[in-house]
Image (spheres, grey):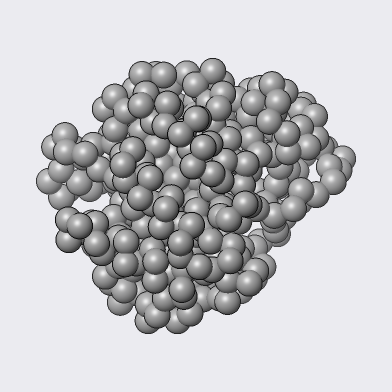
Amino acid sequence: MAGLVLVLTVGCATAPQGARRLPATPAPEPVISTGGGLAVTAPGFGVRVRGNRLVDLAGREVRLLGANRSGTQYACAEGDGIFDGPVDDRAIAVMASWKMTAVRVSLNEDCWLGINGVSPAYAGSHYRAAIVAFVRRLNARRLYVVLDLHWSAPGRTKALDQTVMPDRDHAPAFWRSVAATFARNPAVVFDLFNEPFPDHNHNTTAAWTCVRNGGRCPGVGFAAAGMTEMLRQVRAVHATNVVLVGGPQYAGVVDRWRQFAPADPAHQLAASIHIYLPHYSPCDSLACWNRTVAPLAARVPVVIGEFGAKDCTGAAVTALMRWADAHHVSYLAWAWFTGSCAGEPALISSYNGTPTRYGAAVRDHLRALARGH
């Protein structure tokens, strides 16, 4: 679809949980803003869709290359704080030293809106102010920011995990508020929902229809918010930021993306896919990339919003990054946190930037790109 951006996002998927009926829910929350939006004044620093590419405000091609910064989706809801690990200027300088151009930040709708029993110390105005300050620090390093709705829950249920779809109870209000906050910052991109998996994680017409339209869907135990209605809330507050949209199967497929993409009056849509390797995602092979991703990338810009090596080695992800480079596709690795890679791909073993084997492959590739190799 002309004027759309394709974002490929690979995520650490949580096993689907059984759908459950929930009690009657309150009316959607009012719009919450942090004060009229955040403007970026650096010349040319912003991202827009032009044809099948992302470009900066001066018209130069941009690719969102970097990492996911996990933590802000769970620490607040679990009562541990707002961030997991350091996010100060020194920590951001370490990330920038890898020659990243972008960071994807995971959000929790209950924490942003200050609802469903999240501790007030880590929710509402405190959470929003912390996210706004973090975005400012990232932008100060000329890092683009992707904000995604990562954890959500319907009704009065606290958002403590990834769900099958965004909920109609809170997700539209969440996006209206986030969009109002960052509407004047073109260096911020909105990723409407991390990893949908309706219709019992199948790649079906019913699943794609649910992702686009929401409502009562197979495999979803609550009224889902579709991409169309969440996008409508973003545009209703005059936010023209680039918006990323994923498909079903944990954002793992894009074969019918153009058919089911929501209509965007701003013509600033991005398609999203997640790819985990080896053999951990629906589209985890060169044949699939060439068959479904490349044709889409020829029509709309593509970003791999999440990718990672489940075996914590570098060979498979290096092949993916090289393929993406050749096709002008952006990519953001999962994730900048300390871990062993046994549970999920961790880029670092220390917040001083010491990489895991997988992280070293990502770092060295980004640095080589920056050197023009």
- Where is residue 218? Give x, y as percent: 80, 29
Q: Is residue 310 above or below residue 324?
A: below
Q: Nearer the viewer, residue 351 or 41?
A: 351
Residue at 65% over, 48% down: 152
- Where is residue 292? Give x, y as percent: 50, 30
Image quadrant of residue 23?
Answer: top right
Q: Specify the quadrant that holds the C terminus.
A: bottom left
Q: Is residue 338 above or below residue 151?
A: below
Q: Nearer the viewer, residue 29 or 225?
A: 225
Q: Let me know if residue 326 appears in the view.
A: yes
Q: Nearer the viewer, residue 116 or 142?
A: 142
102 with respect to 121 (left or right):
left
Residue at 73% over, 34% down: 202
- Where is residue 117? Give x, y as percent: 70, 59
Count all numbered tags in the image, as a single digit. Answer: 0
- Where is residue 277? Give x, y as percent: 56, 55
Image quadrant of residue 318?
Answer: bottom left
Residue at 25% over, 43% down: 62
Q: Residue furthest front?
A: 287
Residue at 77% over, 26% down: 216
Q: Specify the quadrant that holds the N terminus.
A: top left
Q: Nearer the viewer, residue 256 or 146?
A: 256
302 with respect to 82 (left or right):
left
Q: Is residue 177 above or below residue 117?
A: above
Image quadrant of residue 134?
Answer: bottom left
Q: Let me know if residue 262 appears in the view.
A: no
Q: Is residue 189 above or below residue 51?
A: below
